[in-house]
Amino acid sequence: MKRFSISACRRAYASGTSAELSGCHLVEEVLRSRRKKQGDQALLRFKELRTVLIISDDTAFRKQLRALFDHGSGFDACEEARNGVEALDRAKSLSPNLVVLDFLLPDMSGLELAEKLRANILGLPILMLTTDYSVNIEKTALSCGVSAVFSKLDDLRTLVANARAVCGIK
C-alpha cells in the first residue's frame, strides 16, 4: 500500500491531480474518523490540519521530538527537515502551524533560518532548542523572530505544552 504524506495530499488537492486524490481521500477519511471518535463532528480539510515542522540534523533527537508531538499533543501532522535549505522548502510546501528548530544546523544558524522563515510565513510561531542555553542566546533569538527558546537538556514535555499554547490547542 502506498503511503501518502500530508504535504503530498495538499499538493494533490491544490493541483487537482486525480490519480493521487484517491489515496489522499483515504488519508482524509482516516483523519475524519479519528476526529469523530474524539467528539469533533466537523469535516476535516487538510488546510485545517495543525502541522509542526521539526528541524534538526540529529536524527535521534528528531525522532524523540516526533514521538512527543505524535502522541496526544493535539497536532495532526509532524514533518521533519535535516537542514535549513530543506526546512525552507518544506515550510513553503507545508505552511506549518509551528516550527521547532535547532540552534545549530549544518548549513545555516537557527537564527538565520528563523529570520527567513518569518519573512516567508508571517506570524509563524518558532520554538528554538539549544544545548547551550543562555540569556544572551534567548535575547538574540527573540530579536530574530523566535517565539521561545528551550534547553535540550530540560524536560521536552514543557516544549510540547508551550507549543500547544502558542497554537491555541487546549
Image (cartoon, grey):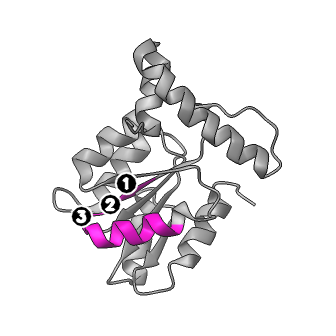
- Foreground mark, 1 or 3, reads 3
143 drawn magenta: no
Name the kind of residue labelled 2 in the image: Leu
Q: Say which residue appears at 70% left-offset and 57% top-offset.
A: 169
Residue 137, image x, y percentages: 37, 75
Crowd rating for badge 3 (residues with CA inside 10 Å; few <14, some 14–19, many 20+): some
Q: Marks 1 and 2, Cα distance to the nearest angstrom?
A: 5 Å
Label drawn at residue 114: 1
Name the kind of residue labelled 3 in the image: Asp
Residue 53, image x, y percentages: 43, 52
Which quarter of the figure has residue 102? Answer: bottom left
Q: Say which residue appears at 41% left-offset and 72% top-offset.
A: 64
Q: Say which residue appears at 53% left-offset and 63% top-offset.
A: 69
Circle 1: element type: helix
Q: Marks 1 and 3, Cα distance to the nearest angstrom?
A: 16 Å
Which quarter of the figure has residue 103? Answer: bottom left
Label drawn at residue 57: 3
Circle 3: element type: loop
Name the residue beneath numbered marker 2: 111
Crowd rating for badge 2 (residues with CA inside 10 Å; few <14, some 14–19, many 20+): many
Q: Is residue 134 left or right of residue 98?
A: left
Circle 2: element type: helix
Q: Which quarter of the figure is the N terminus placed in?
A: top left
Residue 140 visible in the current orientation: no
Name the kind of residue labelled 1 in the image: Ala
Q: Look at the picture and state if 125 lies above or below 32.
A: below
Magenta-highlighted residues: 53-68
Q: Going by the picture, which residue comes out furthest to the front?
A: 1
Q: Look at the picture and state if 166 lies above or below 31.
A: below
67 drawn magenta: yes
Q: Is residue 114 left or right of residue 78?
A: left
